[in-house]
Amino acid sequence: GYFQFAARGESKCRNVQWLARFVLAQIYQAEVQYLTSTGFGDGAYTPSLSKLLSPGVCTIANACNATALALAASHVDITIA
């Protein structure tokens, strides 16, 4: 959270890095699941965002939100290299 001293009615100061960090965390969680899952990565990462969005890879159970990741990908170019 944030603690901000401001006059009443002033807009909140927000961290512009939060969105990028959130999306990177989703990719990280999906990559870990992909890497460790038999039938998916079998010990290898993937540069494919569509593979990371596959059912069973990016799930709430492994702290990855597929809806949020797909939404972010529809607004910006996400390249995994």
Image (cartoon, rainbow, N blue to C red):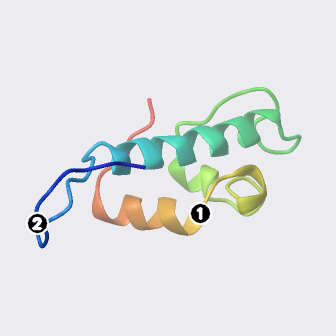
For residue 41, side relative to residue 13 (left or right): right
Q: Nearer the viewer, residue 59 or 17?
A: 17
* Dot 2 or dot 1, earlier in sequence: 2
For residue 40, side relative to residue 15 (left or right): right
Looking at the image, residue 81 lies above or below residue 53: above
Q: Residue at x 68, y 52 (%)?
A: 63
Q: Position of residue 4 (x, y in %)?
A: 25, 50
Q: Residue at x 45, y 49 (%)?
A: 23
Q: Nearer the viewer, residue 75 or 81?
A: 75
Q: In terms of secondary structure, where does tag 1 sit?
A: helix
Return the residue at label 2.
Answer: 10
Q: Are marks 2 and 1 in contact (CB under 8 Å)?
A: no
Q: Nearer the viewer, residue 72 or 7?
A: 7
Looking at the image, residue 63 lies above or below residue 65: above
Q: Residue at x 89, y 40 (%)?
A: 38
Q: Position of residue 52 (x, y in %)?
A: 62, 50
Q: Position of residue 6 (x, y in %)?
A: 14, 56
Return the residue at label 1.
Answer: 66
> Which residue type carries mark 1?
Ala
> Which residue type carries mark 2?
Glu
For residue 61, side relative to residue 27 (left or right): right
Q: Nearer the viewer, residue 11 or 80?
A: 11
Q: Residue at x 20, y 53 (%)?
A: 13
Q: Position of residue 32 (x, y in %)?
A: 70, 36
Question: Could you tell me how far apart the alpha carbons at marks 2 and 1 are, in whole angstroms?
Answer: 34 Å
Label 2 environment density (alpha carbons within 10 Å; few <14, some 14–19, many ≥20): few
